[in-house]
Structure formats: structure tokens, C-alpha cells
Amino acid sequence: MNQGEFYAENQEFYQGGFYNPQFDGSQQYRANYGQDSFYQSNSDANSGVYQPNYQQYGYPDTMSQTYPNMSENYSSTSFEDEPPLLEELGINFDHIWEKTKSVLNPFKETDSHIMDDTDLAGPLVFCLAFGALLLLQGKVHFGYIYGFGALGCASMYGVLNLMSMTGVSAGCVVSILGYCLLPVVALSAITSVIKLQGLAAIFFSAVGIGWCSLSASKFFVSVLAMDSQQLLVAYPCALLYGVFTLLTVF
């Protein structure tokens, strides 16, 4: 069956207003419904381009009417409302500086809530700096640093949970021991410039160990409310920092 025969058989359907092959779509709609009812003229009347008038039939003609909350949802999730990257990673330089100042001044009273934010950014930086300063002396001790550090943190975690009534988290132990490593890092910076021997090495080693253990025990006693137990906590801390001092001086 060719196209003419198909149109002839369906002539009644086509002449009913649904379709007429002699006219294009815009002429058929204008003939049936009128030009102004379904099509509205563009601003350029000579262009012959017609825009559909959807509003007459109850349909929105803009994306803002179709999706009225689109702009509000987009503005609520804009990048301006996103928190900074360092805040998402849990790195707060103000808290790091406050903890560092508490380590540098072991005789200052420490706030009991100073370790509510148990970040590991500061301890990681101090450990890397310690290993880098030892590397300047020709000592490749990164494995010893992380090995003794992990063993010491695990041991202190067990001891403190036995001594404290409230218990302590592993993150808090790692954070405090890592921050209090700062005096040993300073000692390694001195030994990378000046070779310490004899009484000078013993003196600076004792000062570094005492400084680290005093700062760490002060943190633990303040955070865990372990009254009159600072000396008991300082002893295992001194053993741990003594190992790091041996790596530095000898």
C-alpha cells in the first residue's frame, strides 16, 4: 500500500481535525484553535516564529514556575555555606597552639577540657619533625620512633585505665604523648647543631625527660581528675621519653 492509498482509507480520520497532510502542524493548530489561542507571536512579527502560549492551558512557561524551590535549594547548598577544608579534617590551629603552649609551660595550670578535641595533627607533625632532625645527624630512626611510640601509647593506655576511675580513650593518650614530645624535638634540634657529650649530654637529657614527663603527667592528671597521682603517672612517661632521648643523644 502506497502513501496515497493509506491517506485515502483514513481520510475521515484526517479530516476530523487530528491531522491533515496538506498543512503543517502550525497551520493545522491555527486553523482549529486560532493563532492567538495556542500560539502567541514573537516580538519580531516578521520572523514568522510563534511561541506556544502554555499559560492559557494552565501549564507554567518558565523553569521557575515549574520548579519553584529550585533556587532556594541551590542557594542552601552553595559552596559559601560549606565549612573550610581544615575544619572538615579536624585541624584547628588555635587548639594546636593552646596545647603547645601548655607543653612549653609545664607549671601552668591546665584546663580539664583542653583534650576534648583529641586531634592527631600536632603529634604527627612533631613526630615527623623529630625524625627529620635525626635524619640530619645521619640517624634513620623513623621505624624506631613509630615502633616505640606505638608500644608506649599502648602501655600508657593500659596503665591509665587501671589507675583512673573514669577511663581514658586511646586517642587522648596518643594526643597527649605526641604533644609532650616537643621538648625532645627541641633537644634533637640542638644536637643536630652541637654534638653533646659527657656531662652536657646527661644534663640536657635529664632536662628533656623531666620536661616531657612533667607536661604529660600534668595533662593526664587534669583530664582524668587523678588527684595526687601525678608522680605515679610521670614515672611511666619518663621511661617512654627516655627511649626517645637515647635515640637523640647517643
Image: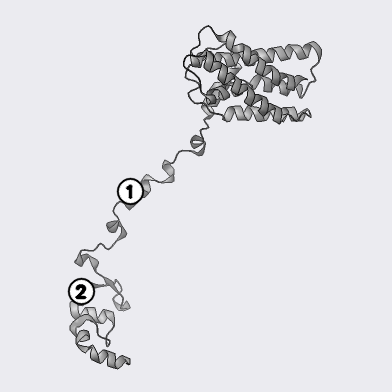
Q: Amino acid at mark 2?
A: Asp
What is the CA distance from the residue labelled 1 to the residue labelled 2?
Answer: 35 Å
Q: Of label 1 and label 2, which has the lower sequence position?
A: 2
Query: Is the N terminus in the top left, top right, bottom left or bottom right quadrant?
Result: bottom left
Marks 1/2 in contact by CB < 8 Å: the verdict is: no
Q: Nearer the viewer, mark 1 or mark 2?
A: 1
Q: Is residue 31 above or below residue 184?
A: below
Q: Position of residue 235 (x, y in %)?
A: 63, 11
Picture quarter containing residue 51? bottom left
Residue 36: mark in rendering: 2
Name the residue that disc number 1 marks. 72
Is residue 124 placed above or below 40 in the rendered structure?
Answer: above
From the top left corner, tell me how far across and down residue 233 is, in percent: 58, 12
Viewer-nearest residue: 36 or 235 = 235
Identified by mark 1, the residue type is: Glu
Visible residue check, residue 115: yes
